[in-house]
Image (cartoon, grey):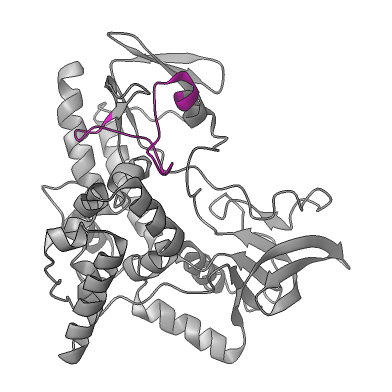
């Protein structure tokens, strides 16, 4: 989990310097701690005058043969020799969009990481969280650490939690690349067969999924646009819970809360919102029919947008409308060449604009985890260096 390929153990070393003996190298530390580690790296770069941190939004890029001009949200502009774009996918619109016109401020939290998002709750008040993935688990854990004792409901379309990591390392399965490249169904059959084979030997199924890690991008690129779309429609949610797993002890804590009645998971979507008696009434449409959740706060943890074609993010919209950027066939992100240079609408690379992270999901699929991100950053830095 270190930030650079040259020192993958740096995060654990950072934890040891602050909490000696608290974390083993195979433990899963809170994501907030990883954020602190990254900010320490930024602060060190700033202290050495090799980086400047500017709190501004970029709404448009314009390129010249020798520069990139950045138009800021403040109306000012910056000129750079090169730009590396790494904002991640834009936040999805809140799942209650169009239903909240008459809802007073304070009941709805569109961004769970916004300062004060969880402030002002009495310990016994009920809370509903939209989503049941890793972010939702983080919010539940955060509420409980703050002493919140009230009921928490996780509301999601699938109603599934992430599956658990195993406590000890598992040998990943080795797959024949040509078998995975045949398409979604052959790949699914191969993974199921591998999981069954592991189970027959008393080994955890996680090794079958972990074996895909080194081949995910190559497999994704081998599939046609139709196959990619089929995967997104039918298997994306299952992939997410198997691939992006949670520490077993956190899932055990959630299960303990479910048994005690302080946590519930509801499969469904928001159908309406009203305020009654100082409480938010969340009308839910589920496969079993309609129901109502009465809560003090509704928190959006549904995650980023599933694609960018309909994005309202000003920077991404401007890139697509100007032709400086282009989206993949499925519309998941922005296209880049194998080196990471953003591709224009005509398919030619921008020599001074590079992409890192989830915006490359349409080309690579696996483009959000630290091992992939640090390799992309190293590749981009090597490509950018001659331009500076």
Q: How many marks?
A: 0
Looking at the image, is 46 positioned above or below residue 184?
above
Give the quarter of the image for residue 152.
bottom right
Task: Give the percent coordinates (x, y) of residue 186.
Answer: 25, 66
The main secondary structure of the magenta stretch is loop
Q: Is residue 122 visible?
A: no
Q: Residue furthest top?
A: 65
Residue found 32% across the figure and 66% down from its top: 243
Residue found 27% across the figure and 20% down from its top: 352
* Residue 339 forms part of the magenta stretch: yes
82 to the left or right of 6: right
In which quadrant will I find the N terminus? bottom left
Observer-nearest of 32 and 94 = 94
Observer-nearest of 331 and 156 = 331
Residue found 10% across the figure and 47% down from its top: 6
287 to the left or right of 83: right
Looking at the image, is 369 positioned above or below residue 54?
below
Task: Give the percent coordinates (x, y) of residue 75.
Answer: 56, 16
Q: Is residue 216 visible?
A: yes
Residue found 18% across the figure and 54% down from its top: 10
Task: Give the percent coordinates (x, y) of residue 229.
Answer: 40, 52
* Residue 41 forms part of the magenta stretch: no
Observer-nearest of 105 and 353 = 353
Give the magenta-colored segment's residue range. Answer: 319-341
349 to the left or right of 327: left
């Amino acid at each position: 989990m270190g930030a650079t390929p040259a020192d993958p153990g740096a995060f654990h070393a950072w934890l040891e310097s602050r909490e000696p003996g608290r974390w083993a190298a195979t433990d899963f530390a809170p994501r907030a701690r990883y954020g602190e580690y990254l900010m320490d790296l930024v602060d060190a770069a700033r202290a050495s005058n090799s980086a400047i941190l500017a709190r501004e939004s970029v709404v448009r890029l314009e390129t010249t043969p020798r520069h990139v001009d950045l138009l800021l949200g403040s109306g000012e502009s910056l000129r750079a020799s090169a730009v590396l774009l790494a904002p991640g996918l834009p936040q999805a619109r809140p799942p209650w969009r169009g239903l909240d016109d008459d809802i007073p401020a304070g009941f709805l939290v569109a961004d769970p990481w916004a300062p004060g998002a969880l402030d002002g709750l009495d310990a016994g008040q009920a809370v509903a969280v939209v989503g049941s993935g890793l972010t939702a688990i983080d919010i539940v854990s955060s509420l409980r650490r703050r002493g919140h004792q009230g009921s928490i409901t996780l509301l999601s379309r699938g109603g599934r939690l992430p599956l658990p990591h195993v406590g000890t390392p598992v040998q990943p399965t080795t797959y024949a690349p040509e078998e995975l490249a045949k398409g979604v169904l052959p790949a699914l059959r191969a993974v199921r067969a591998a999981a069954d084979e592991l189970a027959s030997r008393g080994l955890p199924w996680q090794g079958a999924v972990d074996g895909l890690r080194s081949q995910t991008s190559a497999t994704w690129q081998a599939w046609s646009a139709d196959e990619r779309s089929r995967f997104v429609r039918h298997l994306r949610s299952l992939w997410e819970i198997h691939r992006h797993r949670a520490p077993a002890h956190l899932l055990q804590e959630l299960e303990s809360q479910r048994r005690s009645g302080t946590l519930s998971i509801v499969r469904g979507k928001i159908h309406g919102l009203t305020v009654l008696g100082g409480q938010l009434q969340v009308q839910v449409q589920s496969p079993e029919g309609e129901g109502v959740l009465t809560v003090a706060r509704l928190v959006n943890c549904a995650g980023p947008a599933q694609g960018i074609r309909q994005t309202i993010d000003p920077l991404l919209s401007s890139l697509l409308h100007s032709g400086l950027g282009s989206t993949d066939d499925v519309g998941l992100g922005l296209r880049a060449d194998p080196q990471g240079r953003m591709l224009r609408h005509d398919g030619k690379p921008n020599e001074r604009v590079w992409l890192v992270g989830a915006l490359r999901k349409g080309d690579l699929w696996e483009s959000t985890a630290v091992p992939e991100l640090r390799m992309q950053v190293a590749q981009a830095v090597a490509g950018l260096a001659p331009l500076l």
